[in-house]
Image (spheres, helix red, strand yellow):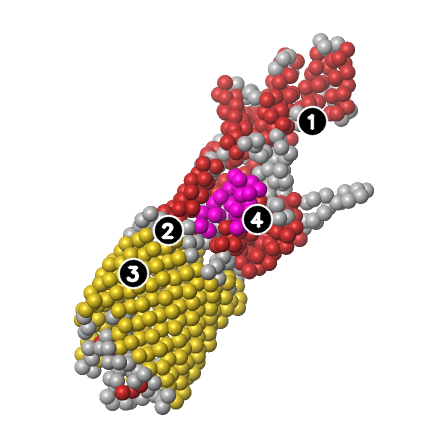
């Protein structure tokens, strides 16, 4: 056993950090992948000897351990062979927490101690060694060395010196759970806990927080809740166990219990408590932990704006706190600001190169920024620094999914019926319409390139029959950091034929602004009414988007269609969304869309082609997360829009629309489908349109 060496090496280290232990379950990444919460554990895990029966020693009964140690040292200085003083010195050292020194000394005269005393002191030394294992090491490579050595010593003691005292035998099994938890061997923690229950042993309450932490790490929050509730009942003022309980509620989607718990916990902690008679207060790191995790709880409840507002003042107070910077970076990532998130993660890594949260978080930030080579390097660094971390597998899977095959398969069907009795009647969409599209892109080549294929078909039924247009071809896509570019080439068939190609690029100026341009020959969005007449169109399109956060988005599109018959059609569309309300499972956004177009030939052509028209629509979008478990979720969406549509020579009409959709997510893949109803007006004639569409998106890159 390494009793003295372990204790002295720990003393030679740097001063104890403000937070020597971070429970794994609080280093979670919940619903937006790759972002990890952080908390600070206020103290080394309890010395389990505190729960053991106290020794009945008449020499120490009436004096403090410090006084007893001083007296014993004096007697031993006068007579080194004084067994009574030697025994008193060992017991005093153990009572003062110097259990390793006590165990080392006891080994010199073991006959002076009863079996239960020897076992208790040896157990105390092991418990202290396990606690010291959580202290920041001198070098990152030695981060787990103390815990591994302590666990090995404990297992050797169980194997070679079985405990004669029932309590001490149980205590070793319980102590092992703490060491296993720190080593991220969470399956072993839960198995050891279950074995204690199976043996009919009443598990001590002080280890229940550790067991609950491991259950959360294994993504078993429903099992963790009763364990953590029992721990809280035993120690109602244990801030860290209550935080763990809050996360267990979050991971079972019980935000109605998690948020009040976190809020009450933060309010119960004074920032600068003051002892009676003290001239000044002391730093209360429990208040910091409560505030930090209260903010993160709101972020997991989708209210990232509130979480940011709560964390921002803390970053001003403690800019050199790596855990705080990493947590703030996680919130920035959820606010769709990967550059800002990466900056915070790197600030944390500058202060603590091995910071687990920051190492994991920067992988997702780099992926979102399309800096895939750097993301792979970040994963390698995380693997080297924390090979035992169960999150590592999820981080690697997310990156592999982003780098892997990307595919989109979609289909749609629609029906339009004329409502005003015009005869003959020709809707721009036909009486029925539909289509499908497929695009498959290869895994990343050299971290930047993809090659792929595409195919699509569109059709519509008009008075004189069905019109079809289809195209298929190959393409290549390039993306790195701010720049994206693509080119496709293929052949079209059906109502119109010939070559088709696209050439485009986009540029990301910062987290908020992005613009793009695309040129297309025989463009897919050419009117099927025009194709019915053998007329094709080329297009040029300019796009711009401003998305400063997850609660606001503004997008614009300016395009020109140039038809073969000499007609040109210019279109401008702008759409905006603003978050109105955020609840853990419900988000309400206001929607605004504005559209205007003009054409050079007006109604002189044989297809719908207003000389001038415009529309404005205002509405609401409600997103309800009906069911969710980590990366798997089912979401329902309702959209209601209404507004005026104006067409030259046809007047102004109000156009309502209603949409209902389902969205299924699992491990980065998405299935979305929905139905939409509207009453559009074309050339002054109102229609009723019902449409259904479905789309499967495979792969994590978008």
N-terminal label among 4 and 1: 1
N-terminal label among 4 and 3: 4
Which callout, 4 or 1, points to the residue nearer the camera? 4
Question: In the image, what residue occupies the spot 42% across and 46% down?
Answer: 375
Image location of residue 567, percent across then percent down:
28, 81
Question: 10 Å neighbourhood of mark 4: few (<14), some, or many (≥20)?
Answer: many
Q: Is residue 299 magenta?
A: no
| Spatial separation of the CA atoms under disc 2 and disc 1 | 54 Å
Which callout, 1 or 3, points to the residue nearer the camera? 3
Question: In the image, what residue occupies the spot 64% across and 31% down?
Answer: 50
Q: Quadrant of the C terminus?
A: bottom left
N-terminal label among 4 and 2: 4
| Spatial separation of the CA atoms under disc 4 and disc 1 | 37 Å
Image location of residue 209, percent across then percent down:
56, 40
- Residue tagged 1: 96
**Range covered by the magenta-colored residues:** 343-366
- Residue tagged 4: 325
């Amino acid at each position: 056993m390494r009793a003295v060496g372990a204790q002295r090496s720990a003393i030679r280290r740097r001063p104890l950090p403000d937070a020597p232990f971070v429970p794994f379950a609080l280093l979670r990444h919940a619903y937006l992948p790759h972002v990890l919460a952080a908390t600070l554990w206020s103290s080394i895990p309890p010395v389990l000897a505190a729960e053991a029966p106290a020794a009945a020693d008449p020499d120490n009964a009436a004096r403090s351990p410090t006084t007893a140690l001083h007296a014993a040292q004096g007697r031993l200085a006068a007579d080194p062979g004084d067994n009574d003083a030697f025994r008193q010195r060992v017991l005093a050292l153990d009572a003062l927490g110097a259990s390793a020194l006590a165990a080392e000394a006891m080994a010199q005269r073991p006959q002076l101690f009863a079996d239960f005393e020897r076992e208790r002191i040896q157990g105390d030394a092991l418990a202290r060694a396990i606690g010291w294992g959580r202290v920041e090491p001198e070098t990152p490579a030695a981060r787990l060395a103390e815990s591994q050595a302590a666990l090995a010593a404990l297992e050797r003691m169980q194997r070679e010196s079985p405990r004669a005292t029932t309590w001490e035998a149980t205590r070793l099994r319980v102590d092992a759970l703490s060491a296993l938890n720190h080593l991220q061997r969470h399956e072993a923690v839960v198995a050891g806990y279950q074995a204690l229950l199976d043996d009919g042993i009443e598990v001590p309450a002080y280890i229940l927080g550790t067991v609950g932490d491991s259950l959360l790490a294994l993504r078993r929050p429903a099992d963790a809740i009763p364990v953590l509730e029992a721990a809280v009942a035993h120690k109602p003022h244990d801030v860290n166990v209550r935080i763990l309980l809050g996360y267990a509620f979050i991971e079972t989607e019980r935000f109605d219990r998690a948020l009040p718990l976190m809020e009450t916990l933060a309010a119960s902690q004074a920032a600068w408590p003051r002892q009676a008679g003290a001239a000044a207060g002391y730093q209360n790191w429990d208040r910091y932990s409560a505030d930090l995790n209260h903010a993160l709880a709101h972020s997991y409840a989708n209210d990232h704006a509130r979480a940011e507002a709560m964390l921002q003042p803390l970053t001003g107070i403690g800019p050199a706190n790596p855990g705080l910077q990493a947590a703030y970076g996680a919130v920035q990532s959820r606010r769709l600001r990967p550059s800002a998130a990466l900056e915070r993660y790197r600030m944390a890594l500058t202060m603590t190169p091995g910071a687990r949260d920051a190492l994991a978080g920067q992988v997702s930030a780099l992926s979102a920024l399309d800096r895939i080579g750097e993301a792979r390097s970040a994963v390698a660094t995380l693997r080297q620094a924390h090979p035992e971390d169960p999150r590592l597998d999820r981080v690697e899977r997310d990156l592999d999914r982003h780098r892997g095959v990307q595919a989109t398969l979609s289909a749609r069907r629609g029906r339009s019926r004329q409502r005003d009795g015009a005869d003959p009647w020709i809707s721009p969409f036909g009486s029925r319409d539909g289509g499908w599209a497929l695009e498959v892109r290869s895994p990343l080549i050299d971290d930047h390139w993809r090659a792929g294929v595409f195919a699509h078909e569109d059709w519509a039924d008009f008075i004189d029959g069905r019109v079809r247009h289809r195209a298929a071809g190959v393409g290549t896509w390039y993306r790195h950091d701010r720049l994206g570019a693509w080119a496709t080439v293929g052949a079209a068939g059906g109502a119109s034929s010939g070559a088709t190609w696209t050439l485009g690029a986009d540029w990301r100026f910062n987290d908020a602004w992005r613009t793009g341009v695309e040129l297309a020959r025989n463009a897919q969005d050419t009117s099927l009414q025009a194709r019915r007449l053998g007329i094709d169109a080329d297009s040029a399109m300019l796009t711009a988007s401003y998305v400063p956060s997850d609660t606001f988005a503004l997008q614009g599109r300016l395009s020109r269609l140039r038809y073969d018959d000499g007609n040109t059609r210019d279109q401008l569309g702008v759409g905006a969304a603003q978050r109105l309300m955020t609840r853990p499972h419900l988000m309400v956004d206001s929607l605004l869309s504005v559209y205007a177009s003009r054409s050079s030939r007006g109604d002189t052509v044989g297809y719908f082609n207003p000389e001038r028209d415009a529309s404005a629509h205002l509405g609401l979008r409600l997103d309800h997360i009906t069911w969710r478990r980590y990366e798997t979720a089912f979401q329902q969406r309702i959209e209601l829009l209404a507004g005026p549509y104006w067409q030259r020579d046809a007047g102004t009409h109000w156009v309502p629309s209603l949409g209902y959709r389902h969205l299924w997510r699992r491990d980065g893949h998405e299935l979305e489908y929905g139905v939409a109803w509207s009453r559009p007006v074309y050339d002054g004639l109102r229609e009723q349109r019902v449409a259904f569409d479905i789309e499967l998106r495979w792969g994590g890159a978008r």
